[in-house]
Image (cartoon, rainbow, N blue to C red):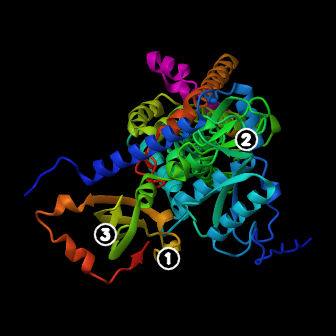
């Protein structure tokens, strides 16, 4: 028997995927074209979040590091709570941490996403560091091994800093873009301008106008 | 020139910890008095197995991801798995069955077949131990983000080892057919009882490796020293396991050491089952089964008790699948 190809709705905010079958709290790895439409996994992640909001749940999505353009990992939870908050379903003040990002309520069985550190806490260190910066201007310095190397300047809490960033450069990922820069960053080094004042003309860096990546 | 002790690395590290501490402190302060208590969950053995069964759909996912991670690294891809298996069989046969040690297989059977069956058991153990030990490193980013029953990770992460032994098994079958045609003797016992014995022996080999991996895999995610320890221990283990020689040829303390080795009986069971040679007493079989069950159960206990904490503490970073000790 030939299986009929599943139809997806690219116009719908949830891409026409039946997300409910994956919303039981277990982790799933979804495959492009099979589980969701032939779109960038980033769109599928947005669609999962839209579906979770519609279902009154939350979802944590993460890219597959091996095949980032083919797979997406998802895990739905009943609610998202901050550290110290009781179970939003039954009010229990005793929760069991089953994972660094998840807890289970022993009273009502609710599966909860912990937001103690917010999105920044759960992200890898390099991503967190990059997200802390603003007005990021980076110029490509070419490729070194498995990494695209960029350098430039940014603001860290309104203070100018020199930035050296490495981004994953796997064959299937293509060039670094504004959309995937935070997901692909693997290493960020930040040096405040004041530490460079004595031996470098830091203002020259800001005057250079040919940036490859502005975040 | 102004000098400072702050390097870019320590600067960003300080920044991260400050941010994390600030966010957590703010959240707890917002919750006020009577804040909910978050207790580390330590599931019982039964709960852990039930949870793993509930997420059994991830077994195939982790299995294929582990295999793909290995294959995608090399231009020749799966060819390396075949080459590794073939070359190690030829190498061991030449060294042990050839001129160097001149070990004789029992009943005048070709040493290559004797070696093939022994290596199936040993490879299941050794290769599983090696690849499963880094299963959390390979899936670090996923395991840190989504809640996967930890037991599944080292077990399904042994894909490469299972495929490698599958290759050895195919080579063994081809050789059996060759010797059958060439000499008229079939070196393969096709009775259900013996086949069951062989496969049960092989299963015990991998179960032993899984049991140890349940200990080593989370620890390896935290520190690579565990892999170094394995590198020293495994070669000794190889020589007290009757892989390249028949156990009957051993004497004295070496024989005692081989018999106390829980892997000896499973390897011998595979030899008795497939080839009809070797010796394994019911007492040794029971001893092995009990010892392997004990190691496996202790592994589940350990990963349940400390796995989440160890993996959670492991530094975040890129998934890592270096296979520097693949050829161990």
Query: x and y percent of residue B317 in the render?
Result: 45, 52
Q: Foreground mark, 2 or 3?
A: 3
Q: Residue at x 44, y 63 (%)?
A: A185
What is the number of the mark on residue A111? 2
Residue drawn at point x = 20 percent, y = 76 percent: A204
Dot label at residue B118: none
Q: Which residues are magenta?
A: B244-269
Q: Does the residue at mark 2 contact the one at mark 3 (Cβ under 8 Å)?
A: no
Q: Front-most of B116 and A146?
A: A146
Does any portion of residue B271 appear in the rendered image? no
Pick the quarter of the image with the N terminus of chain B: bottom left
SS for callout 3? strand
Q: Are marks 1 and 3 in contact (CB under 8 Å)?
A: no
Question: Looking at the image, which is closer to me, A194 or B16?
Answer: A194
Between B29 and B106, the one nearer to me in the picture: B29
> Quick one: label 1, few (<14), some, or many (20+) residues within 10 Å?
few
CA separation, marks 2 and 3?
Answer: 42 Å
Residue at mark 1: chain: A
Whether residue A109 can be seen here:
yes
Q: Secondary structure at mark 2?
A: strand
Q: Earlier in the sequence, mark 2 or mark 3?
A: 2
Q: Which percent across, then down, holds residue B45?
A: 70, 26
- Which mark lies nearer to you, 2 or 1? 2
- Tag of residue A153: 3
What percent of the width, then of the height, locates residue A119?
55, 53
Residue at numbered disc 1: A174
Residue drawn at point x = 52 percent, y = 39 percent: B311
Name the foreground residue: B137 vs B327: B137
Q: Residues within 10 Å of mark 3 (few under 14, many from 20)?
A: many
């Amino acid at each position: 028997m030939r299986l009929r190809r599943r139809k997806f709705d690219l116009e719908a905010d949830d891409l026409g995927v039946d997300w409910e079958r994956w919303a039981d709290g277990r982790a799933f790895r979804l495959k492009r074209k099979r589980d969701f439409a032939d779109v960038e996994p980033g769109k599928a992640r947005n669609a999962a979040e839209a579906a979770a909001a519609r279902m009154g749940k939350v979802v944590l999505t993460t890219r597959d590091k091996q095949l980032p353009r083919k797979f997406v990992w998802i895990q739905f939870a009943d609610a998202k709570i901050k550290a110290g908050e009781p179970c939003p379903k039954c009010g229990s003040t005793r929760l069991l941490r089953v994972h660094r990002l998840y807890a289970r309520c022993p009273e009502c069985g609710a599966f909860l996403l912990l937001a103690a550190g917010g999105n920044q806490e759960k992200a890898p260190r390099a991503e967190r560091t990059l997200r802390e910066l603003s007005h990021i201007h980076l110029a490509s310095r070419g490729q070194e091994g498995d990494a695209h190397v960029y350098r430039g300047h940014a603001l860290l809490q309104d203070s100018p800093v020199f930035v050296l960033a490495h981004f994953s450069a796997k064959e299937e990922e293509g060039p670094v873009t504004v959309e995937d820069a935070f997901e692909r960053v693997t290493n960020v080094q930040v040096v405040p301008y004041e530490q460079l004042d004595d031996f470098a003309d830091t203002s020259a860096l800001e005057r250079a106008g040919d940036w490859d990546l502005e975040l | 020139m102004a000098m400072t002790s702050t390097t870019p690395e320590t600067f960003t590290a300080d920044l991260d910890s400050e941010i994390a501490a600030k966010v957590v402190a703010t959240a707890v302060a917002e919750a006020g008095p009577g804040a909910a208590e978050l207790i580390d969950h330590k599931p019982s053995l039964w709960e852990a197995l039930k949870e793993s069964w509930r997420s059994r759909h991830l077994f195939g996912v982790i299995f294929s991801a582990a295999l793909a991670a290995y294959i995608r690294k090399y231009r020749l891809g799966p060819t390396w798995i075949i080459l590794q298996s073939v070359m190690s069989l030829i190498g061991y046969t030449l060294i042990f069955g050839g001129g160097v040690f001149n070990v004789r297989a029992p009943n005048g059977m070709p040493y290559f077949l004797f070696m093939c069956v022994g290596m199936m058991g040993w490879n299941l153990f050794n290769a599983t131990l090696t690849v499963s030990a880094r299963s959390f490193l390979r899936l670090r980013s996923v395991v840190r983000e989504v809640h996967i029953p930890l037991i599944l990770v080292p077990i399904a992460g042994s894909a490469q080892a299972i495929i490698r032994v599958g290759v050895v098994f195919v080579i063994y079958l081809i050789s059996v057919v060759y010797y059958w045609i060439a000499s008229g003797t079939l070196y393969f016992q096709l009775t259900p009882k013996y086949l069951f014995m062989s496969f049960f022996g092989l299963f015990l080999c991998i179960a032993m490796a899984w049991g140890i991996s349940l200990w080593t895999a989370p620890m390896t995610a935290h520190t690579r020293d565990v892999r170094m320890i394995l590198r020293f221990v495994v070669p000794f283990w190889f020589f007290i396991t009757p892989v390249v020689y028949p156990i009957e040829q051993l004497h004295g303390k070496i024989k005692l050491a081989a018999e106390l080795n829980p892997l000896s009986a499973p390897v011998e069971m595979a030899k008795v089952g497939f080839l009809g040679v070797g010796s394994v007493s019911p007492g040794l079989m029971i001893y092995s089964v009990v010892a392997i069950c004990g190691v496996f159960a202790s592994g589940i206990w350990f990963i349940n008790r400390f796995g989440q904490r160890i993996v959670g503490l492991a530094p975040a970073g890129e998934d890592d699948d270096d296979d520097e000790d693949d050829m161990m």
